[in-house]
Amino acid sequence: MSEFDFEVTRAGAIARIDLNRPEEGNALTRAMMIRLAALLRELGNSPEVNVVAIAGRGPQFCRGRDGRGESRAGMTPYEVRVKMMGAVLDSYQALWDVPVPVVALVHGDALGFGAALAVGCDITLAASHARFAFPEIEHDIPPTMAMCAALGKIQAKALTYLIYSAEQIDAPQAVTLGLASKVLPRETFAADADAFLAKLAGRPRLVLETIKRYQAKAAHLTPDMASEYAGTLMALVRS
């Protein structure tokens, strides 16, 4: 299926969304973000899907947001929040709303919104040559929305430095700081990523859902409540 600059494919229990604007570095417009959020929820809610993967065509994973042609002229602050910022924030929310793991396949550079999209996924596989950065401050933009996607995943001190410095980091550094989960060799990235997806998709959906649900909720609980919640979920699944 191809529409709105995405390629969506299904292979067994794996659903894959490819950003398909290689000539634009897979930069996403607001319309694309809205469609991406809808696709994530649609695929994630399919009982036949155990894993959703996000990848990109061409040399880059995603170089950021494409805001060409956008104008805030005549908008109230509320309208700017809803119409301009809403699409970005909802795409992050959709990653959290998908009940099964969402895996980013970062085969090339992930910058700005691309870095936020990558870190917002549950698992991020990065090719050894990929680079990550939040360059918004260089354009006099405080990237609070990108920071929202990274909270709880990137170490606080590291996130502060990355945001203020706009420095590009390599894949091994990204894993160390929490932007990525694992580095895979550039030469075998596609095959290694496919093997990981196949193994993950072979797990029962209920088990995958339970893990994601617990991780999302338990971080906000006191230790005794987190323990009680863990036992309750296990009891429900095992019964």
Image (spheres, helix red, strand yellow):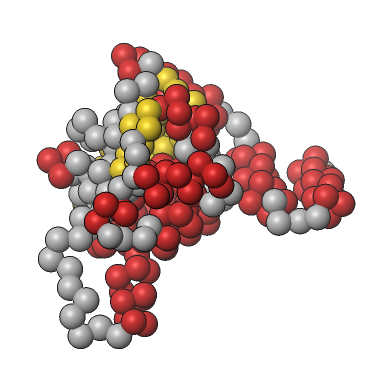
Q: Quadrant of the C terminus?
A: top right
User: What is the x, y in percent for residue 110?
Assistant: 32, 39
Q: Quadrant of residue 26?
A: top left
Residue 197 shows in the view: no
How many marks on residues?
0
Q: Quadrant of the N terminus?
A: top left
Given residues 195 and 105, the one toward you in this image is: 105
Using the image, determine if residue 79 lies above or below residue 17. Answer: below
User: What is the x, y in percent for residue 235?
Assistant: 83, 45
Using the image, determine if residue 75 lies above or below residue 203. Answer: below
User: What is the x, y in percent for residue 187?
Assistant: 31, 14
**Residue lying at 45% horizontally and 24% vertically, measured from the top left:** 172
Residue 128 shows in the view: yes
**Residue lying at 52% horizontally and 56% vertically, measured from the top left:** 97
User: What is the x, y in percent for residue 238?
Assistant: 80, 40
Using the image, determine if residue 87 lies above or below residue 233. Answer: below
**Residue lying at 49% horizontally and 30% vertically, measured from the top left:** 175
- Horizontal arrangement in the rendering, residue 125 relative to residue 6 (left or right): right
**Residue lying at 12% horizontally and 40% vertically, measured from the top left:** 23
Q: Quadrant of residue 66?
A: bottom left
Using the image, determine if residue 194 lies above or below residue 103. Answer: above
Given residues 45 and 4, the one toward you in this image is: 4
